[in-house]
Image (tube, rainbow, N blue to C red):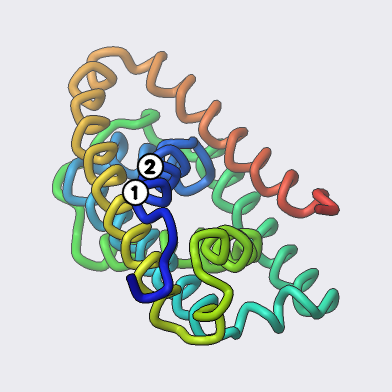
């Protein structure tokens, strides 16, 4: 169908990959627990908007530029690494009571959360290279030059990823009620989350793969 091979296998692999923790996962978790369900859903929208960018790039071959240019890859990689480290430091040194909701979050903050989600995903060149290397495994070589099979598989990955992330955002907000009454635990988790972001940034920047 449309040059796609083993579509059920792709769906199964996509779900497993979606559930594998990464920087996107922790971004959604921290925003959901800190600011509530609405902010969690907005962070999902940001992350998945970034995912759309990568899918389109893979479908139309723009990622080949990234894959074949060491200079461009290095620039984007370090931009993403620095941004993740920035988010980590900001989270680690945040002065409010860790993971405590501070009332109703304003629209401007929601836009900021959305933009941060987009940048967290887009500024990771390995996500783009992942799509470029993973999707072709399920495409008949005779159809690999056209964008349609890439778009279908990318759209499928988007749907499975969005579904998982929404569940993640929805379920993680229940932690807020507990953390509201356990300030020390919230502060500790905040510091750990900051270190995790910093770790992802360092790994992205220093990884030679």
Is 4 located above or below residue 26 in the figure? below
Give me the residue at 60% from left, 52% from top.
84
Q: Report x, y in % for residue 49.
A: 36, 68
Between marks 1 and 2 in the image, the one whose residue lies nearer the viewer = 1
Give me the residue at 56% from left, 66% from top.
136
How many discs mark residues in the rendered view? Answer: 2
Q: CA distance from mark 1 to mark 2?
A: 6 Å
Q: Report x, y in % for residue 102.
A: 23, 40
Residue farthest along the left direction in this orientation: 104
Q: Report x, y in % for residue 74.
A: 80, 69
Viewer can see residue 105: yes
Q: Which residue is mark 2?
A: 12
Mark 1 Cα-neighbour bin, 10 Å: few <14, some 14–19, many ≥20: few
Task: Name the one closer to the observer, 34 or 77.
Answer: 77
Secondary structure of the residue carrying tag 1 is: helix
Is 130 located above or below residue 69 in the figure? above
Q: Which residue is mark 1?
A: 8
Q: Report x, y in % for residue 42.
A: 25, 57
Task: Name the one closer to the observer, 188 or 207.
Answer: 207
Task: Name the one closer to the observer, 7 or 181.
Answer: 7
Asked whether disc 1 touches disc 2, contact meaning CB atoms under 8 Å apart, the reply is yes
Viewer can see residue 57: no
Secondary structure of the residue carrying tag 2 is: helix
Task: Name the one closer to the observer, 73 or 111.
Answer: 73
Residue 107, image quadrant: bottom left
Indicate the quadrant containing the N terminus: top left, top right, bottom left or bottom right. bottom left
Is 96 located above or below residue 6 in the figure? above
Give me the residue at 30% from left, 13% from top.
182
User: Left or right: where does residue 131 sit relative to residue 167?
Assistant: right
């Amino acid at each position: 169908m449309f040059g796609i091979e083993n579509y059920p296998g792709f769906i199964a692999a996509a779900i497993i990959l979606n559930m594998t923790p990464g920087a996107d996962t922790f971004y959604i978790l921290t925003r959901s627990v800190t600011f509530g369900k609405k902010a969690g859903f907005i962070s999902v929208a940001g992350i998945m908007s970034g995912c759309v960018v990568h899918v389109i790039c893979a479908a139309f071959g723009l990622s080949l530029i990234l894959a074949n240019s060491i200079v461009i890859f290095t620039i984007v990689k370090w931009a993403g690494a620095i941004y993740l480290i920035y988010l980590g430091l900001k989270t680690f040194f945040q002065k409010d009571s860790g993971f405590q909701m501070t009332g109703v979050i304003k629209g401007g903050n929601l836009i900021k959360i959305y933009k941060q989600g987009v940048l967290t995903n887009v500024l990771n060149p390995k996500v783009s290279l992942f799509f470029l290397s993973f999707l072709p495994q399920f495409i008949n070589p005779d159809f690999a030059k056209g964008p349609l099979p890439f778009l279908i598989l990318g759209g499928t990955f988007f749907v499975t990823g969005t579904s998982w992330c929404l569940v993640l955002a929805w379920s993680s907000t229940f932690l807020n009620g507990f953390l509201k009454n356990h300030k020390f635990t919230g502060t500790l988790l905040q510091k750990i989350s900051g270190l995790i972001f910093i770790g992802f940034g360092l790994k992205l920047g220093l990884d030679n793969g």
